[in-house]
Amino acid sequence: MAELVPTSWKNNLMQLRENVNRAFDRWLSKRRGSPVDEEGFSLPPVFESGGPAVDIGETDDEVIVIAELPGLGKNDFKVEVTEDRLVIRGNKERSYEKRERNYSYSERSCGSFARAVALPCEVNPDRGQARYEDGLLRVTLPKAEQAKTKRVKIRVQA
């Protein structure tokens, strides 16, 4: 069944919603006199959008998955792989507390996400490797022997 809203539009709309929500939260915090810098306090966008954007590619010998996880540290998420599926789960908590002579102020923010991705072929999960740098997680998974591409030259007769 075809989607009513193309995926590229969904991503743009979710980003727009995120930006509007953040701007509205900043405006509200200034109106109510919040001492917290809302921009620095909020959780990374991956928690609001339900999980990271993911690209999947493959070569003759491996499957490569790249996930966008900006604003997270490598201890904020876990990666699990089976022969046919990759799952990325994350949790993050932030808290702020300020005590002055006449008042006390505290805020807490927490969130979690999980994203499961069906892999295009069977892989060998025990030999997988992952690297996280600059907000991008790159997972390289060797294909199982039966899933590797085999190239054969075929002689063409005239």
Image (cartoon, rainbow, N blue to C red):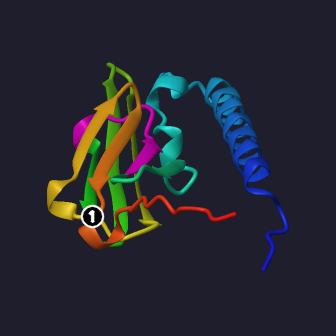
The one of 21 and 36 positioned closer to us in this rendering: 21
Tell me if mark 1 has few (under 14), some (14-19) or many (20+) residues whose alpha carbon lies within 10 angstroms of its own. Answer: some
Residue 12, magenta (yes or no):
no
**In the rendering, at what x and y percent does residue 126 appear?**
14, 61
The one of 80 and 157 positioned closer to us in this rendering: 157
Residue under the point 39% across and 27% down? 103
**In the rendering, at what x and y percent does residue 154 appear?**
52, 63
**In the rendering, at what x and y percent does residue 152 appear?**
43, 61
The one of 8 and 71 positioned closer to us in this rendering: 8
Amino acid residing under circle 1: Val
Highlighted range, magenta: 63-75
Q: Quick check: 32 above or below 48? A: above
Residue under the point 70% across and 63% down? 158
**In the rendering, at what x and y percent does residue 113 appear?**
42, 58
In the picture, which quadrant includes the N terminus? bottom right
Q: Quick check: 69 above or below 64? A: above
Which image quarter: residue 148? bottom left
Q: Which residue sits furthest right?
A: 4
Residue ID for mark 1: 81
Residue 69, magenta (yes or no):
yes
Q: Which residue sits furthest left?
A: 126
Q: Quick check: 105 above or below 1? A: above
Which image quarter: residue 29? top right
